Every structure is written in structure tokens, then in C-alpha cells.
Image (spheres, rainbow, N blue to C red):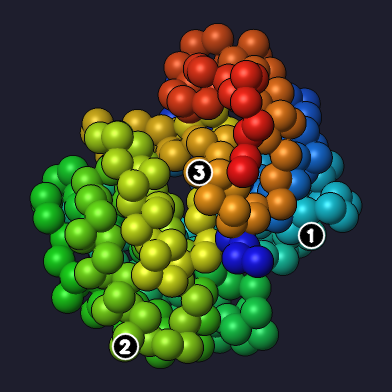
Amino acid sequence: MEKVKIIEVGPRDGLQNLPAFVPTDRKIALIKKLAATGVREIQIGSFVSPQAIAQFRDIEEVARSVRRLRSVALSALVPNERGAEKALACGISRLIFFFSVSSKHNYANVKQSPRASLKELKNICRTYPDLASTSLRVDLATAFGCPFAGKVTTTAVLRMVEKVAAMGVREITLCDTVGFGHPKDVEEKFLECNRLFPEIRFGAHFHNTRGLAQANALRAYDVGVRSFDSAAGGLGGCPFAPGSSGNVATEDLAYLFESMGIKTGTDLKKLLTVSKWLQQILPQAKLSGALFQAGLPSKRKLFC
């Protein structure tokens, strides 16, 4: 039976855009509640400077509090070698290195050019040579469009994939940071990536800014993608991308695939319970998940 991997990014991408600091104990509780839903991996936060994103000034305490969870893989974003060092010291061995295809967005996000970010990635791969092929994933932000530069071409994406692959990295996620992507663009980029780099496992990260996240996820699945990021309740957004809104909701994505007989390993009722709890503790955040708003069907069998 077909399966997909859903990676919960709520504790990272979901919280990073909130203006108010979420208390550490609530972050820890969120991660533990999500771990009980059956998701296979959770991004717990980012090892970045507090001056860049104050929300994660407690990331080391969070990491040390959840690192012994055994039911789920735990990962964290790192922008440089220093972030990687801190994450590994806290017991988080799966790292997500991120940078933007768009130079303008990369400068806004991490205050340097994509070339400089690639140099940081190279340093990580040299310092921790075993990570590249086993526990290091690279996220290419703005792979489908940039709020500052507009359209991002397939050629530009392939150029960055080539540079990352040359360092031995074997897992790359294309990110629709601001929801510019559409199914035709998704199809073109992933088909070309798979054709030219068959050794790479490609994943997808879609935001629902313009309502196309689920359509894009389905098209990505049709062309071979089996790993998808999402956030409980559709929470999220990039603090360095004007107009960015939430991720595709985890419960919506799980419902889409499960309805088609494609197993995700998640428990929809538990996912909805987490989203309801999130809305209670984050009343200032507007959850956008459709299933959260409508609920599960009750007058007929959920799945055929």
C-alpha cells in the first residue's frame, strides 16, 4: 500500500512568525502532543540567533526536554555551522540547513548571499562528514517564487540543487515559502529534479497563501514526491517574507492522502485535538485548517 511521510513543522515554522513569545513549557507540550499523533518527524525549532528570531531563544532548553522522545524523529533548522554545533550538542542529530534560491530573500532572511550560505553548508559537510548522506536535509526556500524578486525559474532551482548535491547531500526539499506555486510549476520542477538527480530524495514544503497548497501537494505526489511538510492547524509564515501565510495544515494533508487510501500513519482525531489545543493557547493566531474548521464527517464512513 502506498505511503507518504508527513513532517510536522508547527513548532518551528508555525511559531516563528508569532509576535508574542510562546512559553517554553507550552512548546515542549506541543511537541509531545504532536508526537502522539503518529507523525514521523517533528521540526522542534531553529538554532538561530535570538536577535534574528526571538521566538527560539529557548531552543536549547526545548531540545534537551524532548530529545528522549522515542516515537518520532526530531529535527531542527540551522543556518550555519554554529547552529549545527549547538543542535548536535543538544542531542538533535537530524539537521535542516536552509537557504533561499532568491538572493534578495536570502539577504532578508540570513543576511548573506546564497553563495555565502553554500559556503556554510560546505563547512558543515566538512566538519560532520557523516551527516551529509544520512542526517542532513537541505531546504531550498523560495523555490517557487520570491516576494522581492518574483518568479523563480526551474533553471535557478536546478542550479542550486546541483551545488548541494555535489556536497554529498542526499535529501533536498523544495519550499514554496510564500505560496506562489501552482500545480504546473510543481510538476515541472520536481520532474526535472528527479530526472537530473535520481540519487536525491526530494520533499515538498507548501504554504497555502493562495489556496493551492493541497493541489500542489497532490501534484507533487503524482510525480513521485513522498515527503511533505505541514503544520497543525495551518499555522505558520515566514517573518522575512511579506504576505506569507500559513503552511498546509497537517490534518488537511493527512485527510487528503488517507481519503485516497495513501497511508500517513497519523491519527486524524488526535491531530484535530492538537489543533484545538493550539487555538486555546494561541488565541491571537488564526488557524486556517479546513478540517479544523469543518470537523470530520460524521454521517458516513470516513474512508471507503
Tell me which label, 1 or 3, sits earlier in the chain: 1
Q: CA distance from mark 2 to mark 1?
A: 35 Å
SS at badge 3: helix
Judged left or right of residue 71, residue 190 is: left
Q: What residue would you read off at disc 3?
A: 256
Q: Position of residue 29 (x, y in %)?
A: 78, 29
Q: What residue would you read off at disc 2?
A: 196
Q: Position of residue 126 (x, y in %)?
A: 56, 86
Mark 1 or 3: the one toward you: 3
Q: What residue would you read off at disc 1?
A: 91
Q: Residue at x 28, y 61 (%)?
A: 186
Q: Residue at x 29, y 34 (%)?
A: 211
Q: Is residue 83 visible?
A: no
| Disc 3 residue type (three-letter) | Leu
Up the image or down, 288 lies above or below 64; here it is: above
Up the image or down, 298 lies above or below 134; here it is: above
Circle 2 crowding by C-alpha within 10 Å: few under 14, some 14–19, many from 20: few
Q: Residue furthest left?
A: 150
Judged left or right of residue 33, residue 102 is: left
